[in-house]
Image (cartoon, helix red, strand yellow):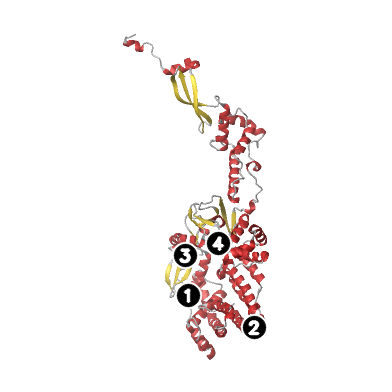
Amino acid sequence: TARLYGHTAAQIQPRWIEPLAGHLLKRTYADPHWERKRASVVATERATLYGVPVVAARNVPYGPIDPMLSRELFIRHALLEGDWTASHRFLQDNRNLLEEVEELEHRVRRRDIVATEAELYDFYDARIPQSVVSGAHFDRWWKDARRREPELLRFTRALVGDAGVDESAFPQVWRQGDLELALSYRFEPGAADDGITVQVPLHALERLRAAGFDWLVPGLREELVIALIRSLPKELRRPLVPIPQTAAQVVAGLRPRRGALVVAVAREIERVRSVHVEPHQFDLDRLPPYLRVRFAVRDARGEVLAAGEDLDALREQLRPRLRAQLAAATAPLERSGLRDWTIGELPRSIALPGSGDSVRAYPALVDAGESVAVRAFETPGAQAAAMHAGTRTLLRLTVPSPLRTVQRKLAGSAALTLAGAPHGGAAAVLDDALNAAFDEVIASGGGPAWDADGFAALRAHVAERLPASAAAIVATAVQVLDAAAELRARLDALSADPPLQPARLDVAGQLGSLVHPGFISATGTDRLPDVVRYLRAASRRLERLPDAVAADRDRMNAIRELEGEYHARGGRAAAPEVHWMLQELRVAQFAQGLGTRGAATAKQIRRALANVGRSG
């Protein structure tokens, strides 16, 4: 009709078409995909009636339409990728096992251990019925199936990946003394953290020592030795071919973490291939980054504060932060200008607020020259050193000095020796001797005091015993200076003979390590008399040197090798007893008639250095 009212006489709504004429509609489906919220596969449906769109784009369940594809997508997305909010225990267990084996791949630096996605898919495909096409279907089936076979869908280690790797060769924890530090591994060449990273809590940074980390972990040690050998100069590398075979022989003879790695490797190369290598000839800069340990320092919340290969540099970088924290926590305790004990009780340690008692400050007296201060330190070791020096200074300010009396009683020859003493003359020697006397009587009085009553008792003890101690120490120091003067004269007499110069320089270095500014208090009263014997032994060595150059050189080289390992382990700061063992070894090698005190063999020294490695 052309009448306008006819347009509304028989109006049809599009929504009526689908329920009334559904059998006439032509339906098509596109973009089937997994939807986490529905826990099923859905697709976009389009419906037309004689070409006229009735449904343009509607998401509908795809399971009834294509159950095979829906089941496949369910297994891949929900079970393999974990894109499903479900609480089934086997899913978490399987994820944990996969992560464990993936982490093993990083540790052993391989990409062929973890099972492929196809293998894991086949595992689920063989066990899950064909009718399971969604999360709801799975839940209904699994409710009964898990009662019959609770392990049906749990991955096994054999399935996920088991390449027969000795996991103990790639430990997850590094132990150093009482510290246990987590190790993380990453196999990603070119990445900043490729290789091994030691996770260091901030509170452990000051106590951690670099010793031992050069050995890496057992699983990478042979690869490390191969890289070290390949870093040698060509003339040394050539007789070590085939290098992998040489490296295997070297590794078999190593005793891990006993001394510096390069020293041990050089020694083993000479043993198995008769090639002499000096430790400094290894070019450590040529090692791949993953064969050098990296450190990551973390705060109490686990956030990385700094990372790198140089432990000392990290300490310097973070020390201002730690000191700022310490200063804020210990500000009420700090004092300056003290000339007597007026501070009540000094606490041994203070926990930093918010650290969970894991970071502590260690207050101590500090030597400020003409007075004493109270400051806080990061470690008990730094506290102990400062407290000792601060206590000595405070006692020197409050106890009369006996030096004038000691000087008046000196014989004429002793006074002349002191007057001609190097490194500051008589005044410096006497002041050093007085410090040593204070050290001795403080130790005999029980060590530094931590409160007013303790300090008063210690001061009385020191005042009573200081004069006799100072007199005895000055007398021994005179003997040391006389022996040193005799040795210098022998050194001067050998200055023009070239074949004797290596030994001469070696003895001059020994003399410098024994007699130097502050040597009396640095040596201590227990060892000071031994210094006289060490110097006399060196004099006898020089006396016999012209007739025994070759034998002297062999003995000197053996001692220098030990000294190199000793310095690599941290020297006197890390192993003070080894310093004296080396001096006794020199006596045993060059002047046996003078006798030795305690251990005096290379084997005993190596054992002592090995203990330093284990404790560090």
Q: Please rate how many residues cluster around mark 1, counting C-alpha atoms within 10 Å: few if below 14, some from 14 to 19, many from 20.
A: many
Residue 12 lies left or right of residue 560; in this view the side is: left
Q: Indicate the amino acid at tag 2.
A: Asp
Residue 594 lies left or right of residue 495; in this view the side is: right
- Residue 379 rendering spot, x and y as whole percentages: 51, 63
Separation of disc 4 and disc 2 at Cα?
40 Å
In what quadrant of the picture does the N terminus appear? top left
Separation of disc 3 and disc 4 at Cα?
38 Å
Pick the residue in front: 557 or 380. Answer: 557
Are discs 4 and 2 less than 8 Å apart at CB? Answer: no
- Residue 351 rendering spot, x and y as whole percentages: 49, 59
Q: Is residue 121 above or below residue 292?
A: above
Q: Which residue is mark 3?
A: 376
Q: Earlier in the sequence, mark 4 or mark 1?
A: 4
Q: Indicate the amino acid at tag 4.
A: Leu
Q: Which numbered mark, 3 or 2, is in the foreground of this view?
A: 2
| Marker disc for residue 284 | 4
Separation of disc 1 and disc 3 at Cα?
17 Å
Q: Earlier in the sequence, mark 3 or mark 2?
A: 3
Q: Is residue 167 above or below residue 61?
A: below
Q: Which residue is mark 2?
A: 547
Q: Earlier in the sequence, mark 3 or mark 4?
A: 4
Q: Which residue is mark 1?
A: 393
Pick the residue in front: 545 or 518. Answer: 545
Disc 3 secondary structure class: strand
Disc 1 secondary structure class: helix
Residue 268 lies left or right of residue 448; in this view the side is: right
